[in-house]
Structures are given as structure tokens and as C-alpha cells.
Image (cartoon, rainbow, N blue to C red):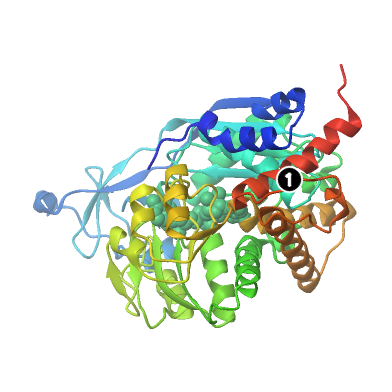
Amino acid sequence: MDRINYEEHMMLFQRVAELLDLPPRIRLELSQPTKEVMLNFTAQLQDRLKRIPEEEWGRFAHVPESNAVVDRDFITANNLEVLADGDIVFDRRVFGRDRISLEDGVVKFSDGSVYRLVRGAPRQFKGYRVQHNNARGPYKGGLRFHQDVHIDLFKLLASEMTWKTAIANVPYGGGKGGIRIDPEMYSVTELERISTRFVYKLKSLVGPYYDIPAPDMGTNARIMGWMFRQYSDGERSRHQLRAAFTGKDVRIGGSLGRREATGRGVFFCIDEWLSRRPNIKQPVTYTVQGFGNVGTWAARCMAEKGHRCVGIQDRWGSIRNDDGIDLNELLQHMADPENVRSSVAGFSGADDVSEGEFWKIPATVCIPAALQGAINADVAEDMDVKLIAEGANGPTTAVADRILKAKGVEVIPDVICNAGGVTVSYYEWLQNLQMSHWSEDEVNTRLEKTLRHNYGIILDIAEGRRPSDQNFEQLSLGREVSIREASMVVALHRIANHYSLEGFSQ
Ligand code: NAD
């Protein structure tokens, strides 16, 4: 993966600021985040059973077998969890349910496997929150749990949120944060402890009218629920604080349609792009990289319209089927208790292929929905697609972008393509503040209208037309610009209005 460089990333902003002749003070306000915070905190980990290599099992012939088999069924029945690295989190409640023999610090299971008990210890974690800009409204942006995060990445992602909220025309600014951990290596109980301890430290920095986190990679509705509890517990007006976190479960104040929103938004943008290209025969083929929240829902919406998924990649493997991958069967494969990593790999309805082969699969559309920088120069050279719909944030490197342009591959930039998530987060926030509920139809109809409208504005600007939207009456570029530049024009135009019409407090 190419190295992230914040200054390099901001070159698009600088170029478009120049193009719009943005006043120097507004440029400075936007060029660096308002606040960059790093938080060190601790949490207590649980005991673990670590697998002893098979060649050493003979040494433990004297250890009586425990009456259980190590697989997911057993784990579910006994509150023991298998983590992605194969370690088992050892919960003492299992003693109340099963005959577990612990001798010489090891446990032997009925399949002969032997595990050593390692005591849980406290561990230190590093958390982050970057607040980029709040000229248009409270800071807004996801919390990412991933092993490779760092402050420059969060600066970059927070600035992207400033542009994205302006493009989606929701009254927010941009923020981003998270924790440097691999969440697949921690139990549910540990994740709850880590998430809530993080919020304990973060509390003074967030709030429903100040900075509103949401899920991102490695976090989900369940984690948002815990975070809300930690944030609001003991507060007198606790329920008015529900809007402090979006992306919650619908049963505790989340919005219908929020879980699906980012993927659905990706689909609306692809559909809008296709509707403007009558030469492309529909249904089309597509591939997806990253099969989590965004990837699965984008794929499901595409499949509903009859489009054919021919390749999928996740962290653990890649699959291909030129006749089409049956998504329902694939989701069943991922939910299989034996499939500890819930991966697409090993699905019987497709062939397993290498990571490199995945990127060469010919298709009309590719939806990157995993990590930033996934499409680098080499990948861009290999790709055989007409459109890249950026479900992930920053999946295409600058060099790859130039290669794709030369190859005639078009892009729907992340700032509009995955803006469905923050748009429905805004609807959730509104519902929480009003203590009301919208129907799923209402959410989806508003989402579709707003995304198609704003994507249309970007396309107008890119193609050298003045958008019919009255906010852009004053805009006159007089020439065509790239789709990424056009997106930035929309963002900066809307943000600059706040500075020029409100002025600066001293
Ligand atoms: P997720 O954690 O639900 O899923 C991530 C997926 O990516 C998983 O399938 C994982 O296996 C896969 N993955 C991880 N590392 C990979 C690698 N090296 N190669 C291939 N696949 C890999 O995350 P998500 O919420 O779906 O977010 C995915 C992307 O979309 C992120 O870039 C995120 O910032 C962006 N995004 C998410 C939302 C949202 O509402 N969740 C909104 C806007 C943007």
C-alpha cells in the first residue's frame, strides 16, 4: 500500500481553492484540522486458550479430555469465542456448563487438541479523534478500529468528511477517529471494554451538537450502542443525548435504512452513471473488494437490479465466478459456524483466486469497499473495468488515478459515492433530536433524491455546465474539470459561503 501523506492528499484542495480564487484566510482555515487528539488508555483483557503445536500434544497424554469439541457450535453453546487467529477466549462461565479439565495450565479437547491457558492482562491502547472543520455544523465522522491507523490517516479522513458533508449538503463539518487495534483479535466482551474506556476518555470532545461519531471500518451498530451508553449513563437528560452517536441499532434509536445506506448510496450513484450512458447494455457485471457493511449492501442493491457479481475479495481471500455469484448462498457460507473468519474464501459457488487475479477480472463496474490505497499503480494497470465506484474512503492512489484516466476508466469519487452513510446518519440525528421515527421508505426516498441531485451537480460542473441549483448561480468556471475537482468545487463553494456570509469572530 502506498504511504499516506496528508499534504499530498490536500493538493486537490489547494488546486481547486486556486481555481475558485478562495480568499487566503478561508484556505488556511481549511488546510489543517482544528484539533488533533491522541488518547492513551487501558483495558483489561480476558484469559485466552492458546493452541499448542500438534507435535507437542503427546506430552499431555495425562490430561483428561474436556467434554467439548472446538468449533463454533461448541463455542456458542459455552460462551467461548474463537478469534480470527485461532485463540479461544476463556470465559469461566464454561465451568458451570461443561466438564472442563484444567491440568498443568492446559485444556485438552475431544479432538485431541491441547491449549495453554494464558492469563488476561491489562493492555494499553491508542485512540484518536481529529476534528477538521465545523464551519457548516458539528464535526461528523466515523470511528475506525484497525491495526494500521495513525494520525495522518485520520487527518486525511477527517478532511474528506468536511468535503463529503458539504457535498451531501448535510449541516455538518468533518471529523474522524478510532483505535489502533485489530478488532478480529478481541472478544465481544473485550471490545465492549475497549470501546467504552475510549469513550470515557473521549467524552469531553464529542456530543450531539459538537462532534457526532458513527461506525466505520471495524465498528458497527453494537459498538455505537455501547458507546452511547458510556457517554450518557448517569446524565439527567440521557435520552436527549441519543443523537451523540449515529449508526445505532434501530431498536435503540437507530434509523431504518442506516445499516444499508452507504451501500445503497453507492448503488444509486452507479445507477445514475449508467442512466447517462445509453451505450452500455444493462444488466452489467461488477466486482467488489471488501465484503463488510458497504460491500455487501452495495452488492445486494446491484443484485436486486439484476446486475451480475463476478468477483469478491475480502481480507482473507478472493473468489470469482463469471456466471455470477449467488449472494444469498454466499452470505450463508459466511454465516457458517465453521467459517470462523466469516470469509468469502472457500465458497463452493465460485473459484478461489489469488489477490492479483481478482483485480484482473473483467467487469463493467468495480466497487472498492475496503481500505484506502487498495487501487495502486500496479492494480490500476491490471484492471479491466469501465467504472470505479468508490465505496471505501480513498481507495485509489493519485498515481493510479492518472493511469486509470489514461485508460479511459471513469471514477465516482468517494466523497459522493459513499455519502449515503453520512446522509442517513443525519436523518438518524434528526429523528433522535425530534424523538420521532421515519419509515424506511421515507429514508430511502430522501436518500435517493439527495444523492442523485448532488451527483448531478458534480457532473454538471465536471462537464462545464452551470448547475441549475440556485446555490451555484454565482459559479462560473467556464471550462470542464475532472470529476474529483468538480466534487471539490461543490464542497468548497458551500463551505466558503459560511465564511464569507458569517465572517470571523476574534
Ligand atoms: P467493514 O469492517 O464492515 O468491512 C470491511 C471489509 O473489508 C471486510 O470484508 C474485510 O474483510 C475487508 N478487508 C479488510 N482488509 C482488507 C484487505 N487488505 N483486502 C481486501 N479486503 C479487506 O467496513 P465498512 O464499514 O464496510 O467500511 C469499508 C470502507 O467503506 C472503509 O473505507 C470505510 O471508511 C468506508 N465507508 C464506510 C461507511 C459506513 O457507513 N460503514 C460510510 C462511508 C465510507
> Residue shown at 65%/63% (left/top)?
265
440 vs 156, left or right, is right
Tally of numbered discs: 1
Q: Which residue extends farthest top?
A: 506
Q: Quadrant of the C terminus?
A: top right
338 vs 223, left or right, is left
Tell me, yes or no, if residue 250 can be seen here: yes
Q: Which of 404/170 is in front?
A: 404
Image location (x, y in percent) of residue 239: 83, 48
Q: Amino acid at mark 1?
A: Leu
Against 313, is 322 above or below? below
Tell me, yes or no, if residue 80 can be seen here: no
Label 1, on which residue? 477
Q: Residues within 10 Å of mark 1 (few under 14, many from 20)?
A: some
Q: Quadrant of the N terminus?
A: top left
Image location (x, y in percent) of residue 81: 41, 56
Image location (x, y in percent) of residue 202: 66, 31
160 vs 377, left or right, is right
Q: Which residue extends farthest front?
A: 478
User: Quadrant of residue 380 in the image?
Assistant: bottom left
